[in-house]
Amino acid sequence: MPLRRIPIINEHFDPQLFIHIVKRCFWIIVLIIGLSLLGAMIYLRYTPPIYESKAIIQIKTENPTTQILEIKTPSQINELAQVLELIKSREFLKRTFDKLPLLISYYCKGTFLSEEMYRASPYTIEAKVNNPDIYDVPIIINFINNNTYELFIDERQINKKFRANEWINIGNAEILLTVNNFESIKLQQNELKKNSYYFVIRNPSNIISENSQKLNIQITNPTAQTIQIMFQDNNALKTSEIVNTIAKEIIIYDVEKKNESAAKIIEFIDKHLVSVQKDLGDMEDKIHEFHIHYNINEDKMNEIAPVQLFTAKINEFEDEIMDMDFELVTLQNLYKQINENKNINIYELIALLSGTKYEGIIASILNSLNQLLNTRESLLNDLTSDSHQIKVIDKQIENQKKILIEFLSTSITRLLAKKQEYETRIKEYINEGFYNQLIEKKASYMISQAGYVSKNEIFELANIPKFIVAPSKKKTLSLFFVTSIIIGIIIVLIRYLLYNQITTVTDIRKYTEVPVIGAIPRYKSKLNLSQLLVHQKPNSLFSESFRSIRSNLQFFSRNESSKVITVSSTVPGEGKTFVAINLAGILAITGKKVIIFDLDLRKPRIHLSFKTENSKGISTILIGKNKIEEVIKNTDVENLDFITAGPVPPNPSELATSADMKKIINSLKTKYDYIIIDTPPIGIINDGMNYFKEADYPLYVLSANLSKRNFIHNINHLSEEKKITNITIILNNIEMRTFKFGYGYGYGYGYGYGYGYGYAYGKSYGYYDENIQLKKPFLQKILFWKNK
């Protein structure tokens, strides 16, 4: 089976590991939640409250006055979007804010927050700014009495006392302070502290930008043409006043714009009346002559409205011109045919004259011409064309044609002249009619201007808000709580992804083929030193785990001779000494003679575990100071002896790898069934590597939730490259609970023998015997309550 690569982060979700990490992070998460809720309360306590006021206004563009006069005012605002942009415009906001006392802001310092005293200040300030540097600078006031005060600018006192109701010069500005309510000032300064009042002279250019950010305008109902004006600020009265002032200013602005439009139209009319009146003065005499020429009764004409009179005459002239155009076309066609055609059809020409004023005159000439033509035709029957009579008649025909042509030419000329005269009259009448219309329109717009009332209507004025809109206690607590939960989840996920410790036997089996011969549960009490415990309660799960290790060791060697067991680990603290001592104890309980000696000459621990002195031991044997029999010590457990490491030598590596060490082991083999060597951690020290390689049972100890996954690389290195094929693994310090899932104890291992996996994570670990009732997890109580 190919071994998997040991990942840097966890690649798969392990519910048990995740629950384990959640439990380990539980108090961290609780602390984060607690700190978040504390932060939320601090935020609520020290954040200035925000109030919001609203007003609703309906926008209408129709004016009853202009409807009656049928006037369309060109400046009417027809789109709600235009109104929104108007209200947001800098010019409109400027004229609105100029009507409010925003140039000077008054404040009162509280214990934690400063409160703006909008229209509630017990004193007032008038200011003349000399230098813009004074803008937006807090100026603190300390009232000494009702007539005397001190000033502090940027925490710096002006070394002078000033009197109220007098103009004073403070460098960048001149101010006049008036006290309105000294009792309120005195009470405030006594309750809190001096210098609790201050004011700020606002920069006019910043007032608009600062307040426009707090203003929100939106269309509420496009059909009803209503908009909502909202404003937020730390002062409740200020919010309502600004909203109501904007709403009222829209009405005033609408009236002003409509009146301004009418005024501009009247100005335009007056300007053109002057020029038109001048032109009409020159033509007045001509019009009078025109009335006489056409027998127009001026008294009767005066009874007719000027516009109606001129309209009637213009229509009359236009009709005359149309008739003239018809006659001109007829005469011009007749003239053309007579000039161009020698063979004239008299009857066709008479037909062309039908309906014209010249039909009778021209028809008589054409009839005379027709008689001459008929006479000539009759004479040609008896005479030739050269005869004297025919020539006389031809001359008469030519004379008649000349007469007709001259008459037609004269008539056409007269008609064209008359048409031009009529067109000139029409222009004159139009000019005078335009003058009279201007007079009428001027009167109409003056009436409109005087009678205009805005149809924009305020549906709802803003009241002074009683409740704050921010910060919302519910929303703030919820937000901070959810944020803390998210942070807790992120911490758990990060710790889960980066969790590199070995937690279960399964973690080991994923990355190595070296068998795991045992899993030791965590002892329920904290042990400062490795101790021999298996003999105290031999029927406990803890002792059972070591018996299982002892049984599993039998599968690795059938040699009945003395066996050498080496116990090592990657780093200190993984429990190798603890495992070595208790494995020795469980072997001794079975009647085997067992000796354990401490080969960790750098950091010996065996003497501490058995609570004895370390004046002699392996190190003194190797230097020839003591013999083996002199350093062997007995324990309370029958058949179990031990040898301490002895004093720490200056050359532990040379001593541990010397040939005398092998002699010691061979000597002990003659007296004991098992020799257990507690070696230094071979992950960082190579002193015990040779003995670990030559041992019958090289045991490699890993500690759950302590040993890193990459420690398994070291085990694989020993097995594959160092050729220690009989190496086995013991997983120490497992956190476990017991579930009654039908497979015995809650730990397991798995080299051909074991008790099945059932260990899990938790806080109730370790040392149980058959008489102790195991505590069931809450999940098991719910899922398996019927199995009771």
Image (cartoon, rainbow, N blue to C red):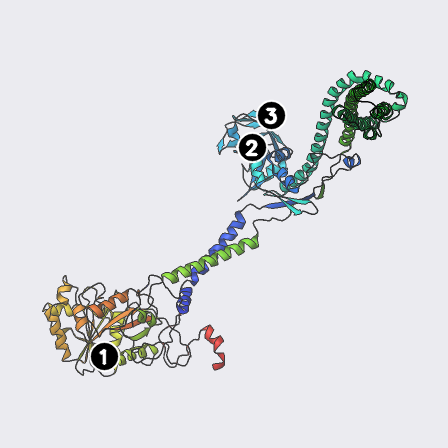
Instruction: Decide if residue 189 is in sight here.
Output: no
Which disc number belongs to residue 205? 2
| Residue type of the residue flagged with mark 3 | Glu
Q: How crowded is mark 3: few (under 14 residues within 10 Å), some or many (20 or more)?
A: few
Q: How far apart are marks 3 and 1 (CA)?
A: 107 Å
**According to the image, label 1 marks what residue?**
556
Q: Which of marks 2 and 3 is nearer the N terminus?
A: 3
Camera-side residue of 447 and 459: 447
The numbered dot on residue 764 is none
Where residue 486 appears, as percent x and y from the top left, is 47, 58
Q: How far is disc 1 from disc 2 in space, using C-alphas?
A: 91 Å
x%, y% of residue 326?
Answer: 79, 28
In-front residue for pair 466/683: 683
Q: Position of residue 441 (x, y in %)?
A: 77, 28
Q: Name the residue under label 3.
A: 166
Query: Closer to us: mark 3 or mark 1?
Result: 1
Local SS, label 1: loop
Q: Earlier in the sequence, mark 1 or mark 2?
A: 2
